Image (tube, rainbow, N blue to C red):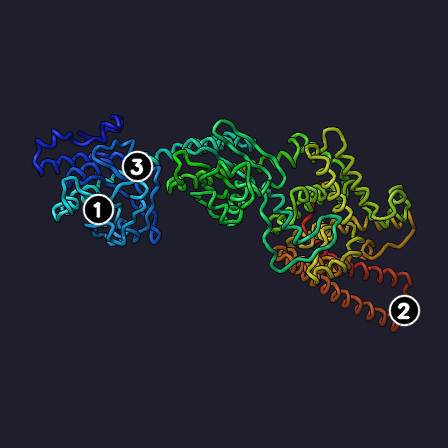
């Protein structure tokens, strides 16, 4: 006969009948038993056959078989079948073994010592041997007198199990050397059979596992829009495969973890400044959602800061904090060992065994905890269960992470049409001035994005704050007229009358609010009232911070706080906005040169307006007649505003260093241009002095005075013409800005 997995289990578990055995001599019986064992690949059936056949060969009363588990140095023996006689049915033997759940470490007791030494142990008087444990006899009422214990090894010589037979049925007072030899010879073949059966069992489990994981993967990719549906699918698959009564999944409160980290670094808007320790302690783990799947129903518990007095939550908390799995054979003992003496009416009476595992995302951050509760057979969860559950946890982490990202996107961002309409409305509300146009707003937003991602500033911000900052960057110069706050005040414009301070910045924010309140333009419509209020406060704070007057007012205080290791959220937000607003100064030289030209042209246009409308002399940076001083003015702008800001930010947050480095490189470029202009200006001044001396010598010559004036003007124009190419005409011609 060959192995047939579909044949009845009871039929396959039987050895040759007694009448058939009498017709066979010892050698034929031995070979028949070996063939019987060699063709069996079901580990339970195989172990039962081994014990029954061993009892027949040695006239033993009963036997037990232990399989080796674990890895060195923590190997142990687990009873596969216990106290099996020649007449014991397989189902009864399995039931007895599972109810006993006997585990013996290597080197402990008779069986453990045989496994460790790999030598047989033959005991003639069990109660006289100190290695014998009489607890089983006391519990069952059976008296053990003789013991023969033999290790079972595979072809590599590794112990895969231990077989133990007890007492003789033929009246003998010991197991004879012949019994030992027959036992050894038979178990040699049995070791190969056990290993084959274990390999077959592993392959079957692996096949089932792969099928389940494939089904799970399909479920994950089919359902990524609703977290509850996804987790319910995962728990259903896990419970059916691993045969447990209940499943539970705790979802970590990531917002709390982020905010706790932020509160140790910076403060929320409106809060007091807080100190930043050198090595802040880790944020406490909290859960906000519990998904639970029972035998007949499922439930989802949404609770702020889940009750840690419950058994499930306490174990989940321990696993999340350690980021290590827990396989608990007795939950009641675990509660006592961990000081949980308070009665838990929800879980304590029903939770017996548990397998608990952390769920991590791609960054290895714990985003939840998964639990399997109460193995159906009453035993502890096995190593195979742990292996399969680890794969479940990986898929669970992938699915939960993706679904949370999708839900956050839906929560923080409006529908695509609303978003597109809002962006187009913002773009349309920028005037076609030379610099403060839509292109500038887009560049500022891109720099903020780079600071948040590449500069890693996002770790200090919540999702709402990040959203508010990006919106503020896009809207921070809405309806800019190409003139600054001082011009609005000088001309007594309606905006200056409406806003006494930060005139244009208040107008930009009002324009932002107006667009958001326009029909089908509110990208914040999906937010709760509290979140809406918070994000609008961030937008307002950020836009008002782009007023350089505010920067100068707060810069010294910000430096002082940094030196003391303290931060204020509003101040940090303002400094980041200023850093983004002037970030063109840190871009590659080709870009910086072009942007400086656009800024200068816009300033010169304002200077022209001041001359024509107000009859006032503009400041140097807005005076078109002093455009040859642009490089030196750029150096002053960098030294006064940009370098101090980027220096303190990069010293505190090293990932922002590229902004400081780029600014230093451009400063050197502008300084070189300024020096060249000064040198050429000096040469021209010398020529003018020489020309003046010549005129004194030839005063008597008859030349009209206006010729000399024309020559001086020409020389001045020449000086300007020589200086300008280094600033203006060397650069490529620019197209019209958007």
Q: Residue at x 17, y 44 (%)?
A: 183
Q: Is residue 625 above or below residue 302?
A: below
State how far apart marks 3 and 1 are (Cα).
36 Å
Marked residue nearer the N-terminal end (2 or 1): 1
Of residue 469 and residue 144, the one placed in the foreground of this image is: 144
Q: Position of residue 377 (x, y in %)?
A: 38, 34
Q: Residue at x 52, y 40 (%)?
A: 312
Q: Position of residue 172 (x, y in %)?
A: 14, 44
Q: Residue at x 69, y 51 (%)?
A: 584
Circle 1: element type:
loop
Taking 21 as reference, is 473 left or right? right
Q: Position of residue 728 (x, y in %)?
A: 72, 54
Q: Position of residue 305 (x, y in %)?
A: 62, 41
Residue at numbered disc 1: 145
Quadrant that contains the C terminus? top right
Marked residue nearer the N-terminal end (3 or 2): 3
Circle 3: element type:
helix
């Amino acid at each position: 006969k060959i192995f047939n997995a579909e044949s009845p289990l009871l039929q396959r578990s039987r050895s040759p009948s007694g009448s058939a055995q009498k017709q066979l001599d010892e050698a034929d019986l031995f070979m028949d038993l070996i063939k019987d064992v060699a063709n069996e690949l079901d580990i339970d059936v195989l172990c039962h056959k081994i014990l029954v056949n061993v009892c027949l060969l040695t006239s033993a009363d009963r036997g037990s078989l232990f399989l080796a588990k674990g890895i060195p140095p923590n190997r142990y023996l687990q009873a596969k079948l216990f106290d099996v006689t020649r007449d014991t049915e397989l189902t009864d033997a399995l039931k007895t073994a599972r109810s006993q759940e006997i585990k013996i470490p290597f080197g402990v007791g008779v069986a453990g010592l045989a496994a460790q030494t790999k030598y047989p142990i033959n005991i003639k008087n069990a109660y006289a041997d100190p290695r014998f444990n009489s607890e089983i006899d006391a519990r069952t009422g059976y008296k053990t007198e003789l013991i023969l214990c033999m290790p079972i090894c595979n072809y590599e010589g590794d112990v895969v199990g231990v077989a133990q037979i007890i007492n003789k049925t033929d009246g003998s007072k010991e197991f004879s050397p012949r019994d030992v030899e027959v036992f050894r010879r038979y178990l040699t073949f049995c070791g190969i059979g056990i290993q084959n059966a274990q390999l077959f069992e592993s392959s079957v489990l692996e096949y089932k596992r792969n099928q389940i994981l494939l089904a799970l993967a399909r479920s994950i990719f089919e359902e990524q829009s609703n977290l509850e549906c996804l987790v319910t699918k995962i728990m259903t698959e896990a419970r059916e495969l691993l045969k447990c009564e209940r499943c539970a999944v705790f979802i970590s409160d990531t917002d709390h973890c982020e905010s706790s980290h932020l509160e140790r670094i910076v403060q929320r808007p409106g809060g007091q400044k807080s100190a930043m320790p050198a090595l802040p302690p880790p944020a406490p783990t909290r859960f906000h959602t519990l998904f639970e799947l029972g035998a007949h129903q499922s439930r989802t518990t949404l609770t702020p800061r889940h009750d840690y007095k419950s058994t499930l939550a306490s174990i989940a908390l321990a696993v999340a904090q350690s980021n290590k799995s827990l396989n608990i054979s007795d939950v009641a003992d675990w509660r006592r060992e961990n000081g949980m003496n308070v009665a838990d009416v929800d879980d304590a009476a029903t939770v017996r065994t548990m397998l608990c595992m952390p769920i991590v995302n791609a960054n290895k951050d714990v985003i939840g905890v998964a639990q399997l509760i109460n193995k159906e057979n009453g035993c502890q969860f096995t190593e195979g269960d742990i292996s399969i559950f680890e794969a479940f946890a990986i898929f669970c982490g992938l699915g939960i992470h993706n679904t949370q990202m999708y839900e956050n996107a839906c929560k923080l961002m409006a529908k695509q049409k609303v978003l597109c309409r809002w962006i187009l409305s913002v773009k349309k509300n920028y005037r076609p001035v030379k610099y403060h146009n839509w292109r500038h707003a887009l560049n500022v937003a891109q720099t903020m994005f780079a600071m948040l991602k590449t500069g890693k500033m996002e770790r200090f911000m919540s999702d709402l704050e990040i959203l508010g900052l990006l919106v503020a960057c896009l809207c921070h110069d809405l309806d800019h007229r190409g003139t600054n706050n001082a011009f609005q005040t000088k001309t007594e414009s309606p905006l200056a009358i409406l806003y006494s301070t930060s005139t244009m910045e208040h107008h930009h924010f009002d324009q932002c609010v107006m667009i958001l309140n326009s029909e089908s333009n509110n990208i914040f419509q999906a937010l709760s009232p509290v979140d809406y209020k918070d994000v609008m406060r961030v937008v307002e704070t950020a836009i008002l911070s782009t007023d350089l007057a505010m920067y100068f007012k707060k810069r010294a205080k910000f430096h002082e706080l940094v030196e003391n290791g303290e931060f204020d959220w509003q101040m940090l937000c303002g400094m980041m906005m200023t850093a983004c607003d002037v970030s063109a100064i840190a871009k590659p030289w080709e870009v910086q040169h072009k942007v400086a030209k656009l800024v200068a042209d816009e300033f010169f246009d304002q200077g022209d307006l001041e001359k024509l409308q107000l009859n006032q002399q503009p400041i140097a940076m807005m005076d078109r007649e002093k455009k040859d001083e642009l490089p030196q003015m750029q150096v002053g702008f960098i030294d006064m505003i940009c370098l101090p800001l980027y220096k303190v930010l990069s010293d505190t947050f090293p990932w922002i260093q590229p902004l400081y480095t780029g600014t230093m490189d451009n400063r050197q470029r502008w300084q070189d241009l300024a020096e060249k202009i000064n040198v050429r200006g000096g040469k021209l001044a010398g020529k003018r002095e020489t020309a003046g001396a010549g005129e004194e010598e030839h005063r008597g010559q008859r030349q009209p005075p206006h010729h000399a004036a024309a020559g001086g003007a020409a020389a001045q124009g020449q000086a300007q013409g020589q200086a300008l190419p280094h600033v203006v005409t060397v650069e490529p011609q620019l197209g019209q800005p958007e």
